[in-house]
Image (cartoon, grey):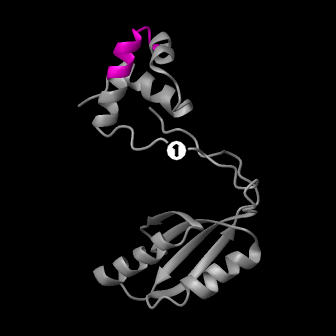
Amino acid sequence: MTLDPTDTLLLAALQKNAHVTAQELGAQLNLSASQAGRRRQRLEAEGYVSAYVARLNADKLGLKVQGFVQVHLHQHGPETSASFARLVRTRPEITSAWTLTGDADYLLRVYCDDLSALNRLIHDVLLPHDAVAKVHSQIVMDQLKQDSPLPT
């Protein structure tokens, strides 16, 4: 299914405010509320919308350290990758993880209470994993741009 310009505008509106009502969408898109609601449901059913979530304030939650951790493996293979992926999924302080091309094998985005918590994550959790050769961490000093909507 290809998106028409109205679908694109609808998706952009949802990224700005997931709580927007069908009536408000209809007004923004020059559609009736029922037409806007049906389009929204179709886009959800087709997988264009993967979830509706609340974006929380890390600082207010006491998560004072945001960092990126590059993980380098000394072993590769399906079992090793699966084992490392299981570890990543079990750790709430790891909020995003990517596999990469280039020098590092993984990039992890982490939020920790403080530097000691980041140190424990690296030295007590990541480095002891059998496949991990080394990690390289970078601490975020300031976030110039918040996570933003995808381009539509």
**Tag 1: amino acid:** Val
Where is 135 relative to 128, above or below?
above
Tell me which residue sits at (40%, 9%) in the image.
Answer: 31
Seen in the picture, residue 130 relative to 118 is either above or below; the reply is below
The C terminus, quarter of image: top left
Locate the N terminus and report the quarter of the image it occupies: top left
Q: Which residues are magenta?
A: 29-38
Q: Position of residue 26 (x, y in %)?
A: 44, 13
Q: Quadrant of residue 70?
A: bottom right
Residue 74: x percent and y percent? Answer: 43, 88
Residue 87 picture location, percent across and down: 46, 77
Residue at 48%, 39% in the rendered image: 150
- The quadrant holding residue 79 is bottom left
Which residue does the image show at 75% across and 79% down from the upper left? 116
Q: Which residue is mark 1?
A: 53
Front-most of residues 67 and 105: 67
Describe residue 26's horizontal placement relative to residue 78 as left or right.
right
45 w.r.t. 147: above or below = above
Residue at 36% over, 14% down: 34
